[in-house]
């Protein structure tokens, strides 16, 4: 019988592998590039993508996270190699944190701020929202940044115009 963990691991492995293929294409000489003055730089966006998986431990090993204590911030990396190292380390730690039972995945998790709960949901839902969906969101942004710099895109959910 499949468990919650089995389903999440399949999703996680697929989405993480796809994100890594994009990060592998980030060129060092373009890290400062921005598509717009209010946008993150390519390096900042890639670093964010590399560190999103750090939320896994905060969600899967704790019952809440208080934003008043500060966000899970990582300083921008200065090379593609550093970004990939951050991503690989975050991936390893997130996957280890996923070793939970179905009952543990159903434990409520809350995001707090200003002394109050902003919301609460089962850990499995918080993990999908703050880790997997967040990863996919920023991966989509990264694919646009790469396309605008004429960097060929790898397959994401099927072939791209660059890989046919």
Image (cartoon, rainbow, N blue to C red):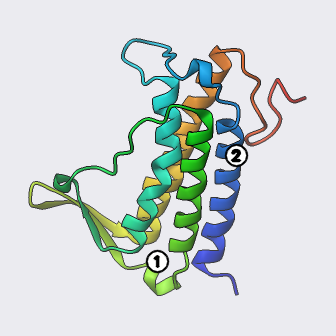
Residue found 56% across the figure and 41% down from its top: 82
The residue tagged 1 is 105
Where residue 54 sits: x, y (%)? 45, 57
Numbered circle sitting on residue 73: none
The residue tagged 2 is 18
Q: Residues within 10 Å of mark 1 (few under 14, many from 20)?
A: many
Q: Residues within 10 Å of mark 2 (few under 14, many from 20)?
A: some
**Rendered image quadrant of residue 63:** bottom left
User: Is residue 162 left or right of 69 when viewed as pictured?
Assistant: right
Looking at the image, residue 65 lies above or below residue 152: below
Q: Secondary structure at mark 2?
A: helix
Where residue 21 sits: x, y (%)? 72, 41
Residue furthest toward the left? 115
Where residue 48 sits: x, y (%)? 46, 40
Quarter in which the N terminus is drawn: bottom right
Where residue 40 sits: x, y (%)? 42, 25
Q: Secondary structure at mark 1?
A: helix
Residue 129: tell me if it is visible: no
């Amino acid at each position: 019988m499949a468990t919650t963990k089995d389903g999440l691991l399949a999703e996680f492995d697929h989405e993480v592998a796809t994100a890594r293929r994009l990060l592998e294409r980030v060129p060092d000489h373009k890290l400062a590039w921005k598509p717009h003055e209010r946008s993150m730089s390519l390096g900042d966006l890639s670093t964010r993508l590399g560190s999103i998986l750090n939320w896994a431990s905060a969600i899967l090993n704790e019952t809440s996270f208080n934003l008043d204590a500060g966000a899970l911030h990582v300083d921008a990396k200065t090379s593609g190699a550093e970004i990939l190292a951050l991503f690989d380390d975050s991936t390893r730690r997130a996957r280890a944190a996923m070793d939970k039972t179905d009952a543990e995945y159903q434990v409520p998790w809350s995001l707090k701020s200003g002394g109050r709960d902003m919301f609460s949901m089962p850990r499995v839902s918080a993990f999908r929202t703050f880790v997997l969906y967040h990863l996919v969101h920023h991966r989509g942004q990264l694919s646009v940044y790469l396309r605008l710099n004429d960097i060929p895109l790898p397959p994401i959910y099927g072939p791209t115009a660059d890989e046919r």
